[in-house]
Image: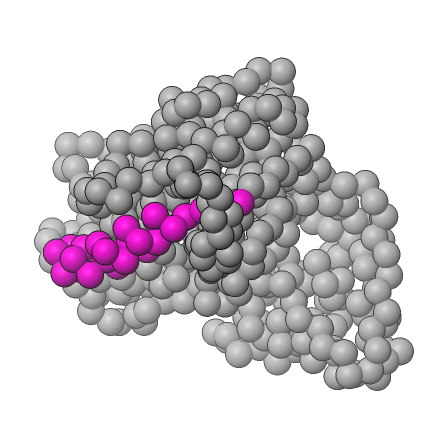
Amino acid sequence: MAEYKLLLPSMGEGVMEATVITWLFNEGDQVKEDDSVVEIATDKVDSDVPTPVSGKIVKILKQKDEVAKVGEAIAILEIEGEGGSTTTDEVKSETSSPDAETIKAIEEPLNPTATSHVEFSGDLYLSPLVKSIAQQENISESELKTIKGSGLEGRITKEDILSHVSNRGNQPQQAVQQQVTPVQAASTPPAVTSAPASTISVAAGDEIIPMDRMRKIIAENMVKAKHIAPHVTSFIETDVTNVVKWRAKNKDMFEKREGEKLTFMPIFVKAIVKAIQDFPMINVSINGDNIIKKKNINIGMATALPDGNLIVPVIKNADQLSLSGLAKAINDLAYRARNKKLRPEDTQGATYTISNVGSFGNLMGTPIIPQPQVAIMAIGAIVKKPAVLETKDGDVIAIRQLMFMSHSYDHRVVDGSLGGMMLKHVHDYLQNWDLNTEI
């Protein structure tokens, strides 16, 4: 029998580590090749790690809530073969060996999380995630020792500490106010603002709900985006009657042929892509005093998740996809986003974003530009309204399908003329949609 080290695989550009959420197998369990053995969380997405070999898990090296670096061993498996030790890289290529960076990542100890005003003696074992929550919530070591851990050997898990924080709200008002006083100026301030933290009073019966990891990331990114980019928003109302008629005529045929739903989103994305091709300076990023004009058109698609959070999977090279291809790509990304099946690379590289606020019944919105992009478009609900139509016999009033669109753009590099004309071109493409368009 041989020993096999399961390494945390590369998960895309910029992703250097992940937190173990839960192991799907226990020590001593047999696993088969390609079985998902552990669920992990990065600052991008939640995903799972499959094993490239069959064998028995003899040692789990990274427990729940612990952080592992890319290239670091997270478990040891016993596999068929001669004695010795192999790794994921060696299984992939017997003639190659891990490069210097991978070896360094395996050999270097995990760096502790950044320290704050709350210090721990080391008498109490805390995973990096639990320690981070304790520091953010200003929980002292003496208070931590009052928490009954449900993890291995009585260790405090993420659920234990979050439950403790939540239960603070059930304590007498005076005690609650003392415990939830925001971190003082000596602690690390928010990266994008110098505004002082204010003390929030908590009344008896108020519920304290800790932000989950994704909500914290969303909050940080939203504040950063508004801090960096001066936002301007333009609006337009579009007659999408032809779009509605075309979809109604083609959706059943498309679903029967492709086994896919035909939504309005691929039509909107197609119009946006054509407008970006008309105005390529909307497909840029800013780096200091330089403007980076993007070659690829990668459309981010804001997607609401069942837990109330938001994620933005990316349609790569959207300009190279047909309407049918866009429909399939959009359906696939939306399904995997809502079922936590996205890969880290699925959320990277967007050059422009669309947000469908109409899916919530909203007429319009003022979306926040995701950094480092410089523009985002929000699509409102489609509503039947009376509208004035110009005909060869004069103006008439008719029932039409109307929709608002709002275009937020970074006024550092996108002036009103560019932002407005780009929006007008999207409007024109949708309003003049050809009923004979093939899919």
Q: Residue at x 58, y 52 (%)?
A: 364
Q: Is residue 328 above or below residue 136?
A: above
Q: How many numbered discs, if any? A: 0
Query: Does residue 105 lie above or below 121 as drawn?
Result: above
Residue 136 can be seen, yes or no: yes
Which of these two is toward me, 279 or 85?
279
Tell me the magenta residue range.
Answer: 237-263
Query: Is residue 108 magenta-colored?
Result: no
Q: Is residue 366 left or right of residue 35?
A: right
**x and y percent of residue 238 in the render?**
48, 44
Q: Nearer the viewer, residue 312 or 132?
A: 312
Q: How is the rendered protein coloured?
A: one colour
Secondary structure mostly seen in the magenta stretch: helix
Query: In this rendering, would 386 be left or right of 262?
Result: right
The residue lying furthest to the top in this view is 290
- Left or right? Give the position of 256 relative to 50: left
Q: Is residue 256 magenta?
A: yes
User: In this orientation, does residue 67 appear?
Assistant: no
**Place of residue 183 in the rendered image (x, y in percent of width and height, measured from the top left):** 80, 56
Q: Quadrant of the N terminus?
A: bottom left
Location of residue 286 with respect to 109 vertically, above or below: above
Residue at image position (72%, 63%) is: 137
Residue 129's x, y, as percent? 57, 59
| Quadrant (top left/top right/bottom left/bottom right) for the C terminus | top left
Q: Residue at x 76, y 62 (%)?
A: 138
Foreground residue, 354 or 270?
Answer: 270
Position in image of residue 94 (x %, y %)? 14, 37
Which residue is drawn at the image coordinates 72% and 77% (left, top)?
A: 207
Using the image as rendered, state which of residue 198 and residue 324 is in the foreground.
324
